[in-house]
Amino acid sequence: MVIFNSLVLTGVLVSSVLYIFASRIKTYLRLRHIPGPAGAALSRSWIFKKTMAGRIPNALAEVAGEYGPLARVGPNWLICSDTKEIRRMWSVHSGWHRDVWYNGFRFDPANDNILTANENKVHHRIRSNVLPGYNAKGITTQEGVIDTQVGKLLGLIEKKYVSSKETGIRPMDMARKFLYFTQDTTSALGFTTPFGYLDVDEDFNNTISTLEGMLPTVTTLGLFPVIISLMNNPLVKSLLPKPHDNNGMGKLLGLIKDRVDARYENKAKGEEDILQRFVESNLSRQEVEAEVLIMLFGGTDTTATALRMTVFYLSTTPAAHGALQAEIDNAIRSGKVTRPVIADAEALELGYLNAVIKEGLRMWPPISGLQLKCSDKDDVICGYQVPAGTAVGISEFTVMRDKSVFGEDADRFNPSRWVEERDPKRLKEMELTQGLVFASGTRWECLGKKLAYTELRKVLFELFLRYDFAMTDPAKPFEYWNYGATLHEHMNVTITRREA
């Protein structure tokens, strides 16, 4: 009997190994005609290592440079760097949908949100319910709310971070201060009352640090979605952050839950904020909590990254720095600029300011991870047959520095390209390509795009009106890790007051 049981166990083990081996071979063969790094076709270890190193966009760009516009980076994963193909796949009527990679951003493992909904119908339902909030439907105070936080940022800089002969160097870490600004702005727009980071100039409760620390984890979950299903296990759930923990993610969940609960208990209050529009929608209470968290997670880090990197590029490009200030000075001299903070309609008329913003976003896309999409039908991409069920991502750094679109100096920060281009067809192609930073014109266009551009225009105008900027340590301007979104550290800038 013992011998019989041993034989059965051996048979099961051998069968399991053979099944796994056969599955690996089958997966390998279906995409064997598409080039890519050695080893990437057989396991997820290649992409996992590159991701954990905090340089995933750079790794994808290197692959695209070596293997072409369509390359294999995993057993069932491809990356595409052909702009027209990406726009086709991401279009509303293409039939493509999100891959399970997005499940890593499920803060509640059992429920979808606007960022994780894989099925197009589910995504459309959620999107149609949250859109009125982001588009400020019935909200007349949004621009004033942003202006208040811009004023607080300027006040903080003036109080603590302006350098002079008298004060000496007083560096400001853009990695933190701009995130304080976007967190306070988004929470004020979302709940009427800001969190108050700019008031105290610190990450109280370590909420921001916790959110940043989660980024490698959620990216890993996207690579191994089976882990998400394990998180529904009661034992695992008991270990996850809970509302009203003393600090970190649980503290943030508690703040959100308290504000949502209060709003549901007094629906007639009629606050003019994004949360109120969510509450008045057809979303469930649980869905509202999930969307508020996504609003804070997705709407703050991306805009903060855009601000940091745009200031960095301006501070290291004297011609652009001077050209922007010249346009700002001319606008002020015209007497047609609202004080103390420029109106967004006025900022929209400033060609070079808007060119600076486009160029900053192009040079360093705030979201630059895989962003995998999938089709239930066979397709042809860049001349290759791609079987149904294959996940196809994007190399943002390659797309945004495509010399056939942006010219031979595509690797250089040059805002003038947007105001000097005279070929309307070329300019349109540049606009369409750069628009992919926020997935503009696609099914998955960023809901917070309008607010992000408004914040960028106002902050950059008011900062460069008042101050000059230079990186405190030009040899090592900052440290960063990029897991699809960028974590900056020690991004110190020296701010000096402009001469009148």
Image (tube, rainbow, N blue to C red):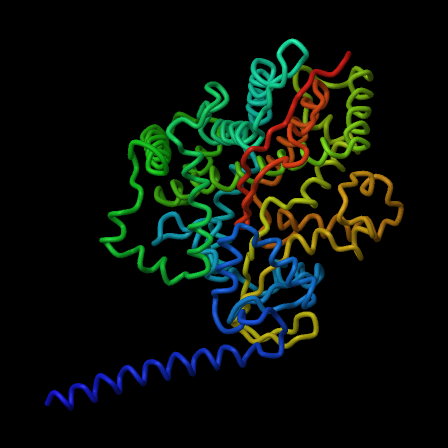
Q: Does residue 13 sit above or below 375 in this rendering? A: below
On the image, which quarter does residue 303 sit in?
top right
Residue 206: x and y in percent read 40, 32
Residue 498 appears left or right of 241: right
Q: Does residue 266 sit above or below 409 in this rendering? A: above
Instruction: Name which residue lies at 48% across and 33% down.
Output: 274
Residue 260: x and y in percent read 36, 34
Question: Furthest-right residue in view?
Answer: 422
Residue 377 appears left or right of 346: left
Quarter of the rendering occupied by the N terminus: bottom left
Task: State the residue in front, 328 or 12.
Answer: 12
Residue 215: x and y in percent read 46, 46
Q: Does residue 298 sit above or below 370 in this rendering? A: above
Residue 461 appears left or right of 416: left
Instruction: Name which residue lies at 68% across and 33% down.
Output: 474
Quarter of the rendering occupied by the C terminus: top right
Task: State the residue in front, 442 or 370.
Answer: 370
